[in-house]
Image (spheres, helix red, strand yellow):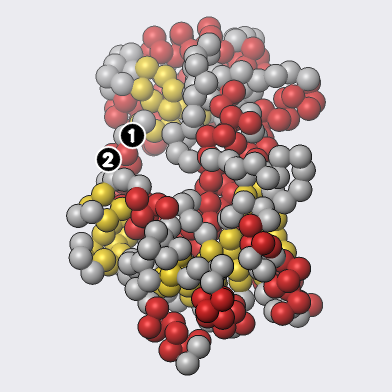
Amino acid sequence: MDGPLKNLLVVDLTRVLVGPYCTMVLSDLGARVIKIEAPEIGDDSRKFGPFVENYSAYFMSLNRGKESIALNLKNSDDKKIFDKILSKADILVENFKPGTLKKWGYGWEEVSKKFPKLIYASASGFGQTGPLKELPAYDMVVQGMGGLMSVTGQPNSEPTRVGTSIGDITAGLFTTIGINAALYDRQKTGKGMYIDVSMLDCQIAILENAIARYLSKNEIPKPMGSRHPSIAPFEAFKTKDSYIIIAAGNDKLFEKLCNILEIPEMFTNEKFSSNSSRAKNMDELKKILENKLSAKSTNEWVSQMEKDKIPSGPIFNIKDAVENPQVEARNMIVKAYHKVIGDFKLAGNPIKMSTYEDPNKRGEIPDLDEHREKIIKEFVD
């Protein structure tokens, strides 16, 4: 891949999701990524379904365009190989439990003395400090502890996990942001730095309205389904055949909505004339809107609202989402090549840059230890 990070070398000591997501983004931005995997076992996610011809689609979706070499960092010979690779690296990314790499002689203090320009990023469940630092964590653990599950789902429902691994993915993205900031800093100082990202921290960072409500009003938010707690109308509404999302986020949009639904009097009604009044009367507002929306299908309403630029849309399943012409036009479903399976479809890179192309094909998907001979020849021999 060509991109702004071209000619940078990333040593990827990560597995499963947080770290591989981060290094996948770095790869999509042009960096070369050498994935260091455990001998015989490899990345844990190689065993995660779904499978295509006995190969993990989960693993393939996160590790396109990377090179793989199997090394045991407890083995002296393998450590020599690793040191050679690390000596040429710009970035090291790892998501082991805090303290693990230090035991093997590769903690930040040891590595930074040898390689002072190296940017060293650690992503873990709870970070490198604090009373929980040594505990393991998975996505759903931090979704729960970070408060996200307490505001997700329908009112009075059981705790509900967000439908994607947002605990892992946000930590992967924040790690990527930190790495890119550190690269800019290195241009000025000539020195690398250590980046410590906690999955739990990242969940707190994205609580936005929920944390604002608690810290400013001492209110503990609860699940509200699809409804926004302070903007109305801003939720899913029933139509004749399904649901429509309507996000009329200001008074002007609400007035347009009232005109489309042929209820202009609603806009002058003191219960609904401002966002604050609408937010206080959400239940009544929803009944009135759904009564009107029940006359037509979701597609008919979306078509009308698009003409007046009212933010709205259907609720797609995954098939609908990935086959949406808009998604296709933005090159968000791309292909990577696997030597057994052939072309494999996966999600593209949402970052579009004017200077660089966004090709429909990504790099090959590596088998475990596939690039050993090439890497040994380049870095060791």
**Secondary structure of residue under mark 1:** loop
What residue do we see at 47% from left, 92% from top? 381
What residue do we see at 53% from left, 46% from top? 168
| Closer to us: 351 or 102 | 102
Question: Disc 2, disc 1: CB below 8 Å?
Answer: yes
> Which of the two discs, 2 and 1, sits closer to the camera?
2
Q: Position of residue 222 (x, y in %)?
A: 61, 18
Q: Tell me the kind of residue under disc 2.
A: Lys
What residue do we see at 23% from left, 63% from top? 343
Task: Classify residue 131 as left or right of residue 160.
Answer: right
Q: Is residue 117 above or below residue 216?
A: below
The residue carrying mark 2 is 319
Q: Quadrant of residue 64?
A: bottom left
Q: Count residues near mark 2 (Cα–Cα under 10 Å), then give few for <14, some for 14-19, many for 20+.
A: few
Task: Classify residue 104 as left or right of residue 293.
Answer: right
The tag on residue 234 is none
Q: Position of residue 171 (x, y in %)?
A: 59, 49
Task: Classify residue 194 as left or right of residue 292.
Answer: right
Q: Is residue 90 visible?
A: yes
Q: Tell me the kind of residue under disc 1.
A: Phe
- Compute the Cα span from label 2 to label 1: 8 Å
The residue carrying mark 1 is 316
